[in-house]
Amino acid sequence: MFKVASLIPQETLDEILQRIDIASLIGDYLVLKKAGKDFKGLCPFHQEKTPSFMVSPSKGIFHCFGCAEGGNAFKFLMKLENLTFPEAAQKLAQRVGIILKTEEGISSQHKEKDIFYKINRYAAWYFAEIFKTSQGRQASTYLAKRDISPETIQKFMLGSSTDAWDGLSQFLKSKNVPLEAALKLGLVRARKDGSSTYDFFRHRLMFPIIDSEGRVLGFSGRRLNDSKENEEPKYINSAESPIYHKGSVVYGLFQAKEALRKTRELILVEGNVDVIRLHQEGLTNAVAPLGTALTQMQVQFLARFVDRFILMFDGDAAGFKAFMRALPILLAEGHHPRVVMLPPGEDPDSFVRRHGSAAMTKLVSEAPMAMDWLVIHHLSQGGTTPSQKAEQVEKIIPFIDQLSSTVERQAYKTKLAHFLGSNSDFLSTLKRSENPSRTRGFSKVEKQEKISLERILFGLYVTYPQLIDDTLNEDVFQNIEDGFIRDLFQKSVTFYRSGAGLSWKQLLSDAADDKARILSGLALSDLFDVPENEVLQMVQDCLYRMKIQRLKGHLQTLTGEIHLAEIKKDPQLLNQLLSQKTEVVRTLKSLGEPTAV
């Protein structure tokens, strides 16, 4: 991860981690007390009275067993000070006396990006100036009708493009901006015959897209002519460029950054005007995706700033679809959002203008958990026949199986079982919670979600690398269903067999944020502090229990599917499932394991 993200040679990053005293670093920010060979303190990332934040100098990592935050020195600074990776690397390098040298060609890339940022800043200034003239009157009238104040207009650097074909082009030319650079940024387009260029944004209200550091990445433009004859898209956004990647950027982040830092909570809305409206009404933690559905990259990026998400989409069919697309992405990343469902036909902007900011604030403060709302919504559509009810249940199950907590999954499935008038067992693993399709993104190693057998096994191999030669075979991989752990196993084997060695510090240096939390939790667990003469037996016990778990999980899945096949009266499918169940039961009995399902 760091090689790509930081553009700093990997050997330099490794040297920084070797030199840094992580206990001394973290001790500059909070009080640490000695706890055996490690240190303990109150977590800086969540409120707690009993210390659960551990620091291991020997492993070069930190981990909080309360909120599951964890990683190495880079990740600590990035999280605590909201730094980018290069910023954190620079700060740590200075601390240990290392001069950062970028790889060949990197400096020129940085210079090119700086030029792009400068050009976009020119364009933003130009649009803001046009807004103040007669050419921007339609844009200013549009905002005035929506009661957007001059202060808010200035805060978001709103502007207007002209209806001329080359207004911006001529301005950039006067600033000696190279045409090739303007083309790369999507500010101008080349005509098909190659004879000349024209402005991409014409006769539009302009919204600069600004990153967390205040740099203009691109623009979003809303058409000002809404007549039926105008077939142009209502909104257009800058094309992808060397500095703008729409799937990883949100609108309003720069303006919301301070509120996000203070509240650790974010309101996600659909449109730019919705963001602006909420900020003007005091809800300054609102942002919006840009011309796209919420992406995993956006969620991972926003998780650097916040712990809690509130979804607030329009009160129409499109808004409901946006909610249904966003929810599984957030759940898969380990977040439990709340949801504000607006009345039919309302969006955040129209709701505030009609009902006032107090009504909106009340909706936000009373927002239910999104999963609770979803379950109630679907069950209310359930119908009366068993088949109709089963159809609604099947719509909910995929969302429940994205939840990282076994207790939560079981609670929701029990509700569904009561709704169907059935025992909850058949629902318990229709889509097993440990299935590889949902493991990606789960970051919390909950001590009582009992560090999984797969993770215990992996920890043993990292702590005692010689096990790779002694016991690792295809049977081990066959019983690992957690895709993240399987990938780690394969990476670890590659490290070990290449002669590079194998350690927690090594694995953490290459891990993304959510994976680092898992790894740091495992590394600081005392599960692997066992005598060497007992390690082999522990590995064999893990493998046996994993195999039993996999078979029992499959048996539960089959039981649930058999129940639904009976409800749907599908004899062919029912016979297939019964045959599979018989085979699994036979295998379990051969392993000396009784079956209660």
Image (cartoon, rainbow, N blue to C red):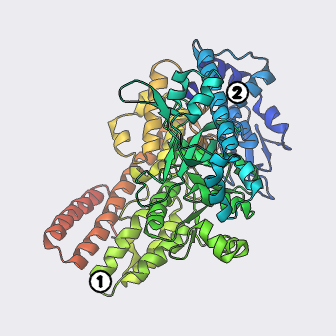
For disc 1, the neighbor class at 10 Å (few under 14, some 14 to 19, many from 20) is: some
For disc 2, the neighbor class at 10 Å (few under 14, some 14 to 19, many from 20) is: many
Q: Residue beneath label 1, please?
A: 386
> 332 or 571, which lies in front?
332
- Mark 1 element type: helix
Q: Residue beneath label 2, please?
A: 89
Q: How many marks?
A: 2
1 or 2: tag closer to the N-terminus: 2
Quarter of the image where one finds residue 29: top right
Residue at image location 43% in from the left, 55% down from the top: 230
Q: Position of residue 436 (x, y in %)?
A: 40, 49
Query: Which residue is at the far left?
Result: 572
Q: Are marks 1 and 2 in contact (CB under 8 Å)?
A: no
Q: In the figure, 183 relative to 474: above or below?
A: above
The kind of residue tagged 2 is Ala
Q: Is residue 338 left or right of residue 415?
A: right
Quarter placement of the C terminus: bottom left
Q: CA distance from mark 1 to mark 2?
A: 59 Å
- Mark 2 element type: helix
> 359 or 159, which lies in front?
159
In the rendered image, is residue 266 in sight?
Answer: no
Q: In the figure, 354 relative to 487: above or below?
A: below
Quarter placement of the N terminus: top right
Q: In the figure, 190 relative to 538: above or below?
A: above
